[in-house]
């Protein structure tokens, strides 16, 4: 990396703007982060319940297929024919007995092994593959797979540690809080194309400082405020993080006087939108960010996976999978559907985020050598902090990022 | 003031004219950003949902926007006007191919196609959303109102954010 990739001397309390725009950095991220020693989220088991079911997914910008084979085992293979590179699977979800590329009908098992090459022996003794062409050497690229309580992760790296170790004890506890072994049910999808760098989305969910200021809707109706009891938790490497809070009472206090946007005269015409029931122990909101591509959202009764699919340095898809539990009470299901209004591309809360991170992208593009200031709550980071006025989880993310990227 | 029976007794041609006017008024209200007037096109217990085609076809219940009352629509307007942060934009909607499916017990079923174009300050106008509406209309105080409006969009990959209604 050249001189234009010199990290600011202040360290992780500064973020150079070239990390959001530079194609070289993006290429290195694909190689080291998404295809490196990480476990990327690819699917929920509930999306592929029976043998032959598949889901088309992505890791970084690479297309993959998550498929349940005849034995019930989940395999993840790259969605790229070993012959000419065609992305042979185009359906988002479906059911097959084998995969066949439409271009030259090369055929693969659900494990990704090549089993058919038409005209392999030629036609009328003419042409065909060389006699020593080995089917075994030309299967689809197979990824390592790990599942935990209905969630499927995959890795391009052979030497990544086991999933549980990768998450670490603190993250694992938060993970198991929502994924406690109960069977999941997908309630719907939502997709948006955000014209900004993928890391800005992660930073947003690692930043409790903005939540009480930008999100007037959340603040006004008491779903998230700086005066709520809360904490910020990371794993020991700093790559994963969680914002945790408990719901407070809707009223103006001394601490909220600084939040200029607080509109305390507002009440909802339809209060059913915000009538959550206590569902999980202790916390009302846990927003978890798992390196390298997943946000797990538990905001009151809305549960969703938000998968980051990178599309170049300045664009990513945010793919939302809303879910609940199989056979849950109809009343709880209804609350999830209503509260989903807070989230997604039209979310009463999350619209603010996708808009603001686009504001960032537009102004860092022409100023790659400038840098962002991350000093709220200090210049370093610790694994656990019991307040919201900190950017510690963003600093910890970049601490790990710099190691992986050697920046 | 026309009663429910008057609408039911209308010729198909007259009913079509009524609907053309209603949909033109609805679109004008939104295009002109008179959002405070928008909930008045709906009954008090109206269901209004903007739903990705994928969810609709798979029978999945989550919508991009989900309302079960006129009150909720008013809350959306409060969010647009007072709480949401977003870049300035124009949205222009075209509703076409209005099809009258006929009267059910208490309501009139209508389907239509729509296209919505988005113009942001520093960007060229783009197609923002394309899809269809499945509507149920009833007569309230002599006017046709939406008892249910499902906006089912093909454009599943939403360009950044959906702020204004469709």
Image (spheres, coloured by chain):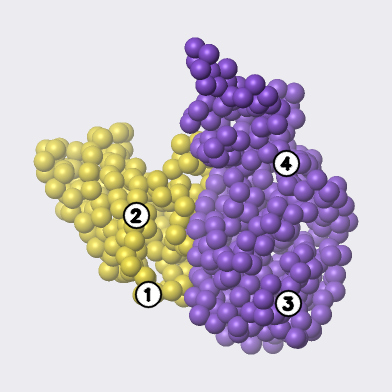
Chain colours: A purple, B yellow
Q: Circle 1 sits in a helix, a strand or a loop, which is it?
A: loop
Q: Circle 4 sits in a helix, a strand or a loop, which is it?
A: loop
**On screen, residue A211 above or below A56:** below
- Farthest top residue in view: A124
Going from N to C along the chain, the mark reached first, 3 or 4, is 4
Q: Circle 2 sits in a helix, a strand or a loop, which is it?
A: strand
Q: Chain of mark 2?
A: B
Residue denoted by label 2 = B42
Q: Circle 3 sits in a helix, a strand or a loop, which is it?
A: loop
Q: Which mark is residue A391?
A: 3
Q: Nearer the viewer, residue A356 or A395?
A: A395
For image coordinates 43% across by 74% down, the residue present is B87
Whether label 3 touches label 1, CB < 8 Å: no
For image coordinates 79% across by 84% down, the residue present is A378
Residue denoted by label 1 = B122
Crowd around label 2: few <14 · some 14–19 · many ≥20 (10 Å): many
Closer to the eye: label 1 or 4: 4
Residues at marks 3 and 4 on the same chain: yes
* Cα distance in 3D space between marks 1 and 2: 35 Å
Q: Position of residue A267 (x, y in %)?
A: 53, 70
Query: Is residue A383 visible to us here?
Result: yes
Query: Is residue A281 visible to us here?
Result: no
* Cα distance in 3D space between marks 3 and 4: 34 Å
Q: Position of residue A253 (x, y in %)?
A: 68, 83
Q: Quadrant of the C terminus of chain A?
A: bottom right
Q: Position of residue A109 (x, y in %)?
A: 66, 25
Residues at marks 1 and 4 on the same chain: no
């Amino acid at each position: 990396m050249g001189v234009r990739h010199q990290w600011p001397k202040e360290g992780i309390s500064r973020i150079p703007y070239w990390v959001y725009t530079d194609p070289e950095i993006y290429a290195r991220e694909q190689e080291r982060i998404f295809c490196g020693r990480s476990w990327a989220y690819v699917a929920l088991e509930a999306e592929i319940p029976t043998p032959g079911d598949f889901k088309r997914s992505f890791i970084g910008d690479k297309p993959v297929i998550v498929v349940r084979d005849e034995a019930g085992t989940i395999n993840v293979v790259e969605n790229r024919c070993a012959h000419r590179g065609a992305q042979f699977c185009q359906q988002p979800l479906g059911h097959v007995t084998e995969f066949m590329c439409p271009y030259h009908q090369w055929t693969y098992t659900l494990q990704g092994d090549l089993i058919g090459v038409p005209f392999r022996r030629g036609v009328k003794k003419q042409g065909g593959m060389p006699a020593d062409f080995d089917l075994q050497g030309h299967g689809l690229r197979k990824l390592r797979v790990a599942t935990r309580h209905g969630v499927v992760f995959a890795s391009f790296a052979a030497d990544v540690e086991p999933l549980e170790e990768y998450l670490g004890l603190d993250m694992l506890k938060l993970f198991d809080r929502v994924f406690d072994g109960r069977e999941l049910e997908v309630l719907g999808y939502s997709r948006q194309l955000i014209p900004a760098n993928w890391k800005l989305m992660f930073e947003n969910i690692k930043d409790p400082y903005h939540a009480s200021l930008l999100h007037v809707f959340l603040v006004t109706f008491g779903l998230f405020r700086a005066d709520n009891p809360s904490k910020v938790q990371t794993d020991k490497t700093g790559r994963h993080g969680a914002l945790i809070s408990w719901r407070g009472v809707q009223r103006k206090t001394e601490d909220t006087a600084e939040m200029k946007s607080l509109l305390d005269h507002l009440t909802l015409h339809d209060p059913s939108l915000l009538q959550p029931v206590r569902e999980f122990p202790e916390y009302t909101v846990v927003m978890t960010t798992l390196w390298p591509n997943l946000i797990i959202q538990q905001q009151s009764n809305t549960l969703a996976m938000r998968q980051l699919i990178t599309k170049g340095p300045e664009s990513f898809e945010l793919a939302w999978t809303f879910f609940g539990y199989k056979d849950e009470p109809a009343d709880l299901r209804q609350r999830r559907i209503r509260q989903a209004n807070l989230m997604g591309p039209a979310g009463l809360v999350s619209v603010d985020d996708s808009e603001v991170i686009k504001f960032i992208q537009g102004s860092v593009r022409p100023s790659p050598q400038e840098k962002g200031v991350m000093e709220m709550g200090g210049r370093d980071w610790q694994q656990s902090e019991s307040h919201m006025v900190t950017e510690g989880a963003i600093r910890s993310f970049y601490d790990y990022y710099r190691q992986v990227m050697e920046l | 003031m026309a009663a429910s029976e008057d609408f039911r007794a209308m010729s198909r041609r007259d009913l079509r004219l009524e609907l053309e006017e209603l949909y033109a008024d609805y679109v004008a209200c939104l295009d002109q950003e008179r959002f405070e007037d928008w909930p008045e096109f709906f009954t008090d217990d109206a269901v209004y949902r903007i739903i990705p085609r994928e969810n609709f076809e798979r029978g999945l219940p989550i919508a991009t926007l989900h309302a079960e009352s006129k009150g909720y629509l008013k809350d959306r307007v409060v969010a647009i006007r007072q709480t949401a942060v977003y870049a300035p934009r124009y949205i222009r909607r075209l509703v076409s191919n209005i099809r009258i499916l006929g009267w059910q017990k208490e309501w009139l079923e209508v389907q239509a196609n729509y296209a919505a174009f988005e113009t942001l300050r520093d960007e060229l106008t783009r197609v923002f959303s394309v899809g269809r509406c499945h509507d149920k209309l009833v007569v309230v105080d002599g006017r046709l109102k939406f008892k249910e409006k499902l906006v089912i969009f093909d454009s599943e990959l939403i360009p950044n954010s959906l702020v204004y209604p469709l």
